[in-house]
Image: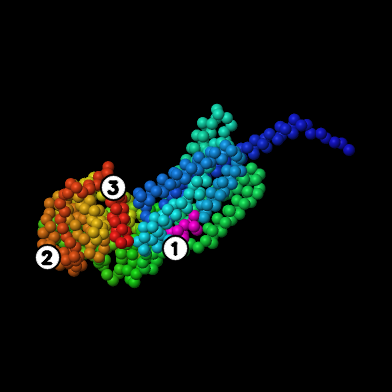
Amino acid sequence: MATTTENPATSLVSAVPSVAARSRVAGLVLMSVVFIGGASVMTVEMSASRLLAPYFGTSLFIWANLIGLVMVYLTLGYWLGGKLADRNPRASVLYTITAIAALAVGLIPVLSRPILSWSLTGFTQVSVGIFYGSLVGVILLFSVPLLLLGFVSPFAIRLRSVGIASAGGTAGQVSALSTLGSILGTFIPTFLLIPYIGTAATLYSAAAVLLVFSILGLVSTSNTRQAMLSVGMLLVVLGLAAFAPRGLVKPPERGELIYEKESAYNYIQVVREGKRVGLMLNEGRAIHSIYNPDELLTGGPWDYWAIAPYFSQGFQQSDYKSLAMIGSAAGTASHIVSNVYGDIPMDGVEIDPEIVDVGRRYFALASLPSVTTHIEDGRTYLQTGGRDKKWTVIGIDAYRQPYIPFHLTTVEFFQEVKDHLTPDGAVMINAGRTLHDTRLVDALANTMLQVYPNVYVIDVPTMANSMVIGTASPSRLENFAENARHVTQPVLKQIFDTSLKQGNIREVKPDAAKLVFTDDRAPIEEVINQIILGYVGEAGR
């Protein structure tokens, strides 16, 4: 029987490509995990902002806390990850860590729900302790996955480094790939995943993808036991995605919920109370639009844009020729103005297209043929699409409750608005207040006085709002009552009657001691935070 003997040299040569191929695969998996890890960090951060928005809003205060703590978690992760990588530089250790991080990401939607529900109790009881306790609880919820994801870059650099000569190139390659992942992890969830599949599904998807690549990494290192455990984690995440109760993102503050959606800009709820439909955004503490087929007037700020220019001497109904609403929401103000003045040209400016869609579906916005809606930031619209237009009234109601975007409150902005008003025109902005605290109203009025010859305030008697009016030309407070006497339109007469009897109408004079908002310095969130804390303090006594 013939026998053959394999040449040892030939055997060694044939093994080399196999080793090289495995090394290439291992390197590809490692760098894929670096990329997915970077994307996961930003996916968690952007999703965190959406989880917090319905309960705590999206103010600069919330973003500062969120971003600052994310940086703290990552900093600690980089430090601990580097130390662990030096002590135990094995790829299987890294992939086990990323698998645990992925599981922690997948648990966020489930664990955040009871904490966020607790925050509702704080709102209801006006409890500062519960409110901030739940905020801290939610933010800490993100500490585990982000801390562990911080391990990825230093670990990958340690595994890829083959000597001092290549250390810089390796660190640059890993950092660049992680940053590229972070870029995509910012844009894809914000503009695609969260608006179309929701925050919870976005987190489950990120967790599943990270787990898949962690499993591939463990398989490539022949760590069968950890790979099987990670498969179990993947099944848990997929099970949560498929069977975890979703229900409402948040129960409505009032009425019956008939619609909810997360857009790229807002968490949107539409609620019904009897025949009245209301639009709630984000934390849902205020109504942003109202529609009742049987009752035109709302008793709220939307009614007052119909009377803004009547401080000008001799102003008549026929002089009200056009309206621009910056922050038009679902179109309540346009609906009232259209009913009073007929089909005059109206431009609604709303940054969130989903709100406009809601307006057409639930608030009869589609029944207003004279309204042209522009999906754009209000100030940008004045500088671009509306740069050659002038209006009788420009209304500003661009709340991200309870805040107003600062760039819509400054001297520079109000100068741009004035340039778009007719000579007998007026600007009116909706401002929040409490019974004893009008510092936001005062600051806006003082800012507008830097641009407009006369500024007036009308308090909304049924709500914690005041309407601040600036006239393009010199005017007098007495003109308002005089012009009201000549009004014949029934709805308009009703608005005037409420304003004159209950609106505490007053003219504002310049006050050097009060704030003036500019593009360079507009601490509007600080002012509003002080109002909120003052209100909570009063309610707690």
Mark 3, secondary structure of its residue:
loop
From what the image shows, is residue 118 above or below residue 406?
Answer: below
| Chain-order first, disc 1 or disc 3 | 1
Q: Residues within 10 Å of mark 2 (few under 14, many from 20)?
A: few
Left or right for 368, reference 455:
right
Mark seen at residue 248: 1
What residue is drawn where x is 26% and y is 67%? Answer: 296
Q: Nearer the viewer, residue 1 or 41?
A: 41
Q: Residue reaching furthest front?
A: 541
Q: Amino acid at mark 3?
A: Pro
Residue pointed to by mark 3: 523
Q: Amino acid at mark 1?
A: Leu
Q: Residues within 10 Å of mark 3 (few under 14, many from 20)?
A: few
Q: Residue reaching furthest top?
A: 165
Q: Which residues are magenta?
A: 108-117
Q: Nearer the viewer, residue 489 or 43?
A: 43
| Chain-order first, disc 1 or disc 2 | 1
Q: Position of residue 518 (x, y in %)?
A: 25, 45
Mark seen at residue 485: 2
